[in-house]
Image (cartoon, coloured by chain):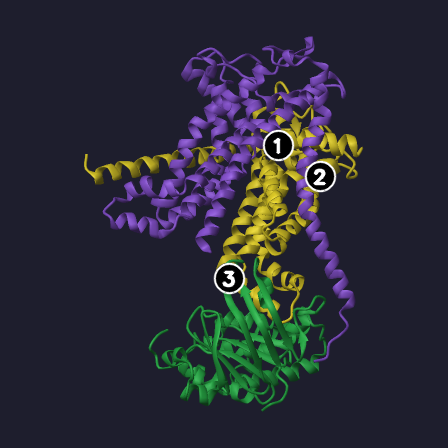
């Protein structure tokens, strides 16, 4: 377990408007080959934290970060860093499935082609692998050239996961990926996660406490921009040390 | 008077106002179609004007307007779309951006005859292009820019932000995202704006008065440095400057011009509605 | 993953992005250039003619009389007449389209009004000459149908599409909840329109009116064709029923015939400069309320 952390956050704070902080002095290590779940009530800074890990917050006008974020020991906010390469290493799946307005196949090849991959055979092979890993291959293998928007919500979200896997990332970030899905689709996505964590570092913002407890190898509780408590999943959910964590887990607030 | 009676009277007043706007439009189009249709013939559309424009056709004016419209498109479309991309996809809310927006609003409000003066000063005289299709197209292009920019920007902004975020998160650069996702999705909207802008350019007279238009030139232009006749100016000439002009030819010319611009208008409407029906978001 | 070198692609990309950024500046440059050329060609007029003479009441270029006052007042008169018709008519129509008309009627009305915007001004001018001016002459028993009134009516209809569509957008942007709140308090829809919706959209409506007036004052061809073009001071009570001449029409009619570099030429450019400044001012007011609107929305959102 105690190998080098994949991500290391050091005193990270973030503000969207320069006045109030969405994150305050968060320090955290994220280890490879396990599922790290960041949970807590709404507006606690979970998504903000997630979006700092692939620098998606760069798109926010007026946002400012303090502190350091290290990926494999390297500062990902240092000047001159290739941000697009970073985002290929750190893939992301969003709360609502967003299939790009094109066919299923093109959704999958979109990322690799941006990176300059032209090898057809490699792409075909990779499409199958990614769809299998996202538990979608059997459902769409005969309709890869249909518009992705024709898939059901659950299928779309698994397509988005497969689309991320096409880039062979090292880390997969999932921002409440099952919040709009029915229980069966949710179970399929959660099953995929258990497979994926063998090869990838997985960071998830679960959409409720139950899901956090189900999927988390390592759990992080956030409240109003602050990291309250972190620990191994089974320990944190059975014996929380902080009163606020306990209150939240047992459903007394939030 | 009861509140509801008042409301009913009020609504009637509003409906009357709308009718007062719409009926004259119908009337204008109706009169021109009714009076102009008898003048339209194959000869009218394909022959040179004869007998001091009192007979023959209006071919050079039609060709001139088509050429000017195309020339306007060549300059205004790439530039206008580029500015729209800048404003919608790159610009942050800075003083510079605000100045650019202010400039666009003001360009849109500059009187068309002032564009004519500007075209005369800059293109005809200063850049020595002479009164030519090139000078006229450039003048019309600058006049058309605000329309194209603002409609294209609107079309770009209508593309859901989530597409951009996803593309960026898949390792796309901003430009890749614009080129592969945003532009294709916004294309029908941009096209609609472009056509509406060109429609205005095609019907304008004042900007071409001193930059390109020939009073009477019964031949087709030979190059972009040539003068040309054009439908709007021709209609102006034959309805105010030529005594004894058969009214039939005037109406016929007006009808051809009207068909030219309104078919562009129709095309824009068709593109817009088909696109709305088909898009996936 | 197997990547190919993207060096060349990156270079093209950064070049394109720089080009796109430059085009934004180009727009500002155009506006500045228009201003500069008007000053360069028109500025000489203020040196060649004493300012007092420019403000004279007689415009006879052939006798070197360059009083632009009748032209300025002519433009004002025709525009004021157009505003009196188009502002109320435009607002009422916008309210009808946005608040009262059923959906299908909106879908018909909006393209219709767009058609009006698309009709070339020279076509309207032509029709004004052959169809409207005889009516004016007969009904009002005027010596000619080519009058300021005819021009005002034409201009009103040319300004209408701008006013209706911008005002309609503004009304449409008023949040549903405002109206619901008023209706829940027992107001009729009619009262809601005038006490809640229209006031809430007032800055957008102001913009619509400004843009409409700007459009009217700068209109050229239709005005030139139907106003009779007599450069007289429109100070008598019957001015609306007599011919008048606007700044725009003067430029359009005379620029073709003057010698380049002559005083007359410079004065025409100077008139262009005056027009430019007037419309610039009007558009600044319009833009100011647009920007103010945006800031307020920004505050609501954050």
Q: Residue at x 69, y 82 (%)?
A: A122
Which chain does the residue under circle 2 lie in?
B
The residue beneath circle 2 is B138
Give the x, y percent position of residue B122. 74, 33
Give the x, y percent position of residue B99. 61, 43
The residue beneath circle 1 is B112
The residue furthest bottom is A1
Chain seen in green: A
Which chain does the residue under circle 3 lie in?
B
Give the x, y percent position of residue A108. 60, 76
Give the x, y percent position of residue A228. 46, 77
Residue B278, label in figure: 3
Q: Is residue A104 above or below residue B109?
A: below
Colour chosen for chain C:
purple
Q: Are marks 1 and 2 in contact (CB under 8 Å)?
A: no
Q: Are marks 2 and 3 in contact (CB under 8 Å)?
A: no
Is residue C234 something one can see in this rendering? yes
């Amino acid at each position: 377990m105690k190998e080098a952390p994949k991500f290391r956050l050091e005193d990270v704070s973030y503000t969207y408007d320069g006045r109030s902080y969405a994150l305050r002095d968060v320090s955290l290590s994220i280890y490879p080959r396990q599922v790290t779940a960041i949970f807590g009530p709404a507006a606690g800074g979970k998504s903000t934290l997630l979006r700092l890990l692939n620098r998606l917050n760069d798109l926010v006008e007026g946002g400012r970060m303090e502190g350091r974020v290290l990926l494999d020991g390297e500062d990902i906010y240092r000047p001159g860093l290739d941000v697009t390469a970073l985002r290929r290493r750190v893939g992301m799946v969003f709360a609502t499935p967003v299939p790009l307005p094109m066919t299923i196949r093109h959704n999958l090849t979109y990322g690799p082609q941006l990176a300059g991959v032209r090898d057809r055979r490699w792409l075909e092979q990779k499409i199958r692998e990614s769809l299998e890993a996202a538990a979608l291959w059997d459902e769409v293998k005969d309709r890869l050239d249909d518009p992705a928007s024709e898939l059901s919500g659950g299928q779309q979200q698994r397509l988005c996961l497969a689309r991320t896997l096409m880039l062979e990332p090292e880390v997969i970030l999932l921002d409440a990926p099952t919040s709009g899905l029915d229980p069966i689709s949710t179970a399929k996505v959660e099953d995929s996660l258990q497979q994926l964590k063998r090869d990838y570092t997985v960071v998830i913002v679960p959409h409720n406490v139950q899901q956090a407890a189900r999927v988390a190898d390592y759990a992080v509780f956030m409240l109003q921009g602050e990291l309250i408590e972190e620990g191994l999943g089974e320990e944190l959910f059975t014996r929380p040390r902080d009163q606020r964590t306990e209150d939240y887990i047992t459903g007394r607030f939030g | 008077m009861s509140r509801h009676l008042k409301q009913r009277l009020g609504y009637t007043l509003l409906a009357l106002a709308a009718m007062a706007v719409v009926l004259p439009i119908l009337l204008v189009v109706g009169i021109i179609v009714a009076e102009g249709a008898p003048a339209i013939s194959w000869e009218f559309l394909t022959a040179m004007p004869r007998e001091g424009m009192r007979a023959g056709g209006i071919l050079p004016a039609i060709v001139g307007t088509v050429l000017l419209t195309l020339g306007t498109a060549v300059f205004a479309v790439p530039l206008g779309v580029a500015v729209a991309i800048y404003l919608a996809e790159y610009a942050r809310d800075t003083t510079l951006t605000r100045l650019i927006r202010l400039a666009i609003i003001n360009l849109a409000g500059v009187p068309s005859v002032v564009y004519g003066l500007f075209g005369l000063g800059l293109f005809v005289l200063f850049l020595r292009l002479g009164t030519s299709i090139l000078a006229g197209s450039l003048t019309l292009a600058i006049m058309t820019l605000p329309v194209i920019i603002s409609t294209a920007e609107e079309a770009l902004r209508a593309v859901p932000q989530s597409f951009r975020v996803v593309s960026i998160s898949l390792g796309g650069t901003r430009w890749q995202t614009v080129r592969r996702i945003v532009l294709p999705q916004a294309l029908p909207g941009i096209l609609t704006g472009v056509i509406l802008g060109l429609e205005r350019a095609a019907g304008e007279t004042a900007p071409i008065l001193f930059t390109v238009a020939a009073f009477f030139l019964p031949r087709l232009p030979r190059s972009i440095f040539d003068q040309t006749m054009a439908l709007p100016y021709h209609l102006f000439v034959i309805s105010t400057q030529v005594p004894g002009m058969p009214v039939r030819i005037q109406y016929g010319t007006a009808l051809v011009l009207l068909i030219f611009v309104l078919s562009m208008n129709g095309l824009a409407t068709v593109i817009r509605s088909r696109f709305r029906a088909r898009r996936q978001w | 993953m197997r990547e190919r070198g993207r060096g060349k692609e990156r270079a093209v990309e950064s070049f394109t992005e720089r080009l796109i950024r430059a085009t934004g500046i180009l727009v500002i440059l155009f506006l500045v250039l228009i201003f500069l050329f008007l000053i360069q060609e028109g500025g000489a007029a203020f040196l060649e003619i004493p300012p007092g003479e420019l403000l004279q009441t007689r415009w006879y270029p052939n006798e070197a009389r360059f009083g632009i006052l009748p032209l300025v007042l002519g433009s004002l008169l025709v525009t004021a007449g157009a505003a009196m018709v188009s502002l109320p008519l435009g607002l009422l129509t916008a309210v009808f389209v946005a608040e009262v008309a059923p959906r299908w009627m909106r879908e018909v009305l909006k393209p219709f009004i767009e058609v009006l915007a698309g009709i070339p001004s020279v076509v309207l001018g032509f029709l004004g000459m052959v169809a409207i001016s005889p009516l004016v002459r007969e009904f009002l028993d005027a010596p000619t149908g080519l009058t300021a009134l005819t021009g005002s009516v034409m201009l009103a209809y040319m300004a209408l599409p701008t006013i209706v569509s911008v005002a309609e957008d503004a009304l449409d942007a008023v949040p549903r909840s405002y109206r619901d709140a008023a209706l829940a308090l027992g107001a009729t829809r009619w009262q809601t329109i005038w006490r809640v919706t229209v006031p809430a959209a007032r800055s957008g409506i102001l913009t619509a009116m400004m843009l409409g007036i700007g459009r009217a004052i700068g209109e050229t061809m239709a005005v030139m064709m139907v106003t009779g073009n007599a450069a007289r001071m429109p100070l008598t009570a019957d001015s609306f029923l007599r011919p008048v001449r606007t700044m725009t029409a003067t430029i359009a009619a005379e620029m073709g015939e003057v010698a380049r570099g002559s005083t007359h030429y410079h004065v025409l450019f100077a008139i262009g400069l005056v027009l430019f400044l007037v419309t610039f001012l009007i558009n600044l007011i319009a833009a100011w309320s647009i920007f103010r609107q945006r800031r307020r929305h920004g505050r609501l959102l954050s």
